[in-house]
Image: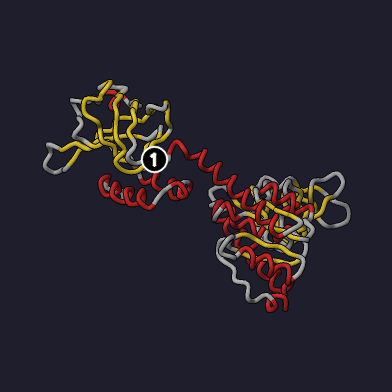
Amino acid sequence: PVYSVLGFEFLTGIWQLNNRISETEFTIISDVVPNVSSFLVFQGAYKHHKEVRAAQGVKIVARGLQYAMAGTSLIVVKPGDDLRQAEAAAMQEIDMAISTTDENEKGTTTQEVSSIMTCKEGIYVQASSVGTLEAIIAHLKSSSVDIPVYDWNLGPVYKQDVMKASAMLKRKEEYAVILAFDVKVMPEASALAAESGLKIITADTVYRLVNIYTEHIKGLKEAKKMQFAAEAVFPCTLKILPNRIYHSKDPIVCDVEVVEGVVKVGTPICVFTPSKDKSKNTIVHSLGRISSMQTSNGNQIFSARNGVVAIKISGDSPQEKSRSYGRHFDSSNELVSEISRRSIDILKECFRDEMSAENWQLITRLKMQFKIA
């Protein structure tokens, strides 16, 4: 067990079965415990030791021990060892311990709710009774809500529940949530959830529970959009309007018609021109990013298909600043948003709700043009 003793940090007892261990070792217990502060041999009053050798029982003192799981192994990571491999081994042991505990605790209850289908990715649900649990999950799986369930449990939320639900932190952040209805959340569970970044949501009605979760998801999505806004490149093709070039070199200012997609302030713009090299069909000239846009109604931050807008393209690099209208390109060349593999992934991950089917088709065509895998 793990417990606190006056004058010490948290203590836990271990049986050392082989080799030696010293208090200078970097150790992991259940993937959450840092360096060991000291060793205390079981015999009589506690006695401090710098190093102990197998085989004997000892108690160790360390920060974070309150989050360790009793019954799991203490793993010693020595200089040169693979820390990630040790963490993975610790998490695998925790998963096995939790699975065994769940099987023992749920018992016949599992048969009662055998109709509940869980997913590899989803939220964790905690309820006070089988009937309540079934009602919550039925509501979550309805077409109007459609929230997947990773696992469930009955009764108070314990540290083990938090550890199991925390698996979603590395898989899908929006599912790193426990919906707890009509149950108590134990203090150690709340502490571990706060430390790990897991969200525990409680409410007095099922609908309020789901609404709070929905608002939580919206907040996460908006935060992600803000985080990756500068790297998100929406697809667009622009037609330069002849005789409406107001500045031919950096910053390039001209009127354009949005032929396809959506153009936004911050979009990197390039132009494809024929190559003199027979081994290449075209050359890509990067011009810079759109730093401002205007229409007759004033400043704009975006313009959709068929819109006519004045844009200013500002170069970032010396090469981009050297590009000029009339020398490197003209009104016969189409201006295109300069997409990349990363910008496409960001659109998929964070801005899917802002992309139309037509825009995805344009992405597919531009991928071929840019030779993006």
Residue at x 54%, y 46% (from the top left corner)? 221
Circle 1: element type: loop
Could one spot residue 58 in this view of the protein?
no
Seen in the picture, residue 356 relative to 116 is either above or below; the reply is above
Nearer to me, 234 or 184: 234
Left or right: residue 223 compared with residue 348? right
The one of 50 and 223 positioned closer to us in this rendering = 223
Where is residue 12 drawn, in percent x and y?
77, 55
Looking at the image, residue 309 lies above or below residue 215: above
The residue that mark 1 highlights is: 233
224 lies above or below 317: below
For the N terminus, the image quarter is: bottom right
Q: Look at label 1 and name its amino acid.
A: Val
Task: Say whether residue 132 is left or right of residue 332.
Answer: right
Q: Position of residue 233 (x, y in %)?
A: 39, 40
- Closer to the camera in the image, 229 or 15: 229
Residue at image point 40% right, 32% down: 266
Q: How crowded is mark 1: few (under 14 residues within 10 Å), some or many (20 or more)?
A: many
Farthest-out residue, front: 296
